[in-house]
Image (cartoon, rainbow, N blue to C red):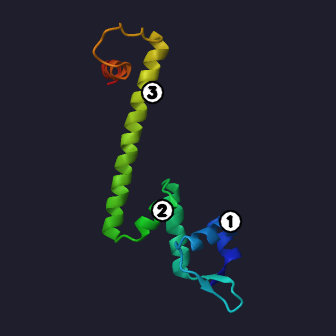
């Protein structure tokens, strides 16, 4: 069993962060007779997982969710997260290509009045021509 100060040092997070994880129900809280927090080996493993998931940019609510899942469901959750990130990356690459086109070509002319589409629709069509 380890006290919170020692676990803080091991984990590389503040005592307040550990207290927050406890208050969010992410760790099983054990206390001494003097009401000091104690962490068991499985608590350290849980903190490790939390820190790994935080590094994946998951929010506390998402971490709670994934920790409640079976290993198979966790794998599916991670695969979905990776797919979402890949989609975000693809969208960012398209935005970068559009910005680069604007840099090279300058601001496109305003579309003529009387078109049956909105500016936003026109921009979308313009981007589809530019972005591959």
Quadrant of residue 33 within the rendered picture: bottom right
| Separation (CA) of disc 2 from disc 1 | 20 Å
**Residue 67 versus residue 97 in the image, above or below:** below
**Residue 115 versus residue 78 in the image, above or below:** above
**Which callout, 2 or 3, points at the residue further toward the start of the chain?**
2
Q: Is residue 70 left or right of residue 38?
A: left
Q: Quadrant of the C terminus?
A: top left
Quadrant of residue 13 within the rendered picture: bottom right
Q: Secondary structure at mark 2?
A: helix
Seen at 43% across and 28% down, the residue is: 95
Residue at the disc numbered 3:
96
The residue nearer to you, when weighing 118 against 60, is: 118
Q: How many marks?
A: 3
Badge 3 local density, few (<14 within 10 Å), some, or many (20+)? few
Question: x, y percentage for residue 10?
Answer: 64, 70
The answer to whether the residues at label 3 and label 1 have Cβ atoms under 8 Å apart is no
Badge 1 local density, few (<14 within 10 Å), some, or many (20+)? some
Seen at 31% across and 67% down, the residue is: 72
| Separation (CA) of disc 2 from disc 3 | 31 Å
Seen at 54% across and 77% down, the residue is: 43
Q: Residue furthest bottom?
A: 33
The answer to whether the residues at label 2 and label 3 have Cβ atoms under 8 Å apart is no
Badge 2 local density, few (<14 within 10 Å), some, or many (20+)? few
Q: Residue furthest front?
A: 114
Q: Secondary structure at mark 1?
A: loop
**Which callout, 3 or 1, points at the residue further toward the start of the chain?**
1
**Which callout, 2 or 1, points at the residue further toward the start of the chain?**
1
Quadrant of residue 122 within the rendered picture: top left
Residue at the disc numbered 2:
61
Query: Where residue 14 is drawn, which disc sits there?
Result: 1
| Separation (CA) of disc 3 from disc 1 | 38 Å
């Amino acid at each position: 069993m380890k006290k919170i100060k020692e676990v803080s040092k091991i984990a590389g997070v503040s005592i307040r962060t550990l207290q927050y994880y406890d208050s969010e129900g992410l760790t099983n809280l054990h206390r001494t007779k003097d009401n000091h927090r104690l962490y068991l080996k499985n608590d350290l493993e849980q903190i490790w997982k939390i820190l790994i998931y935080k590094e994946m940019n998951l929010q506390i609510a998402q971490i709670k969710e994934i920790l409640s899942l079976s290993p198979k469901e966790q794998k599916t959750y991670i695969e979905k997260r990776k797919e979402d990130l890949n989609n975000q990356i693809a969208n960012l690459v398209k935005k970068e290509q559009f910005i680069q086109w604007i840099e090279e070509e300058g601001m496109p002319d305003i579309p003529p009045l009387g078109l049956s589409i909105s500016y936003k629709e026109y921009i979308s069509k313009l981007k589809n021509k530019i972005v591959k």
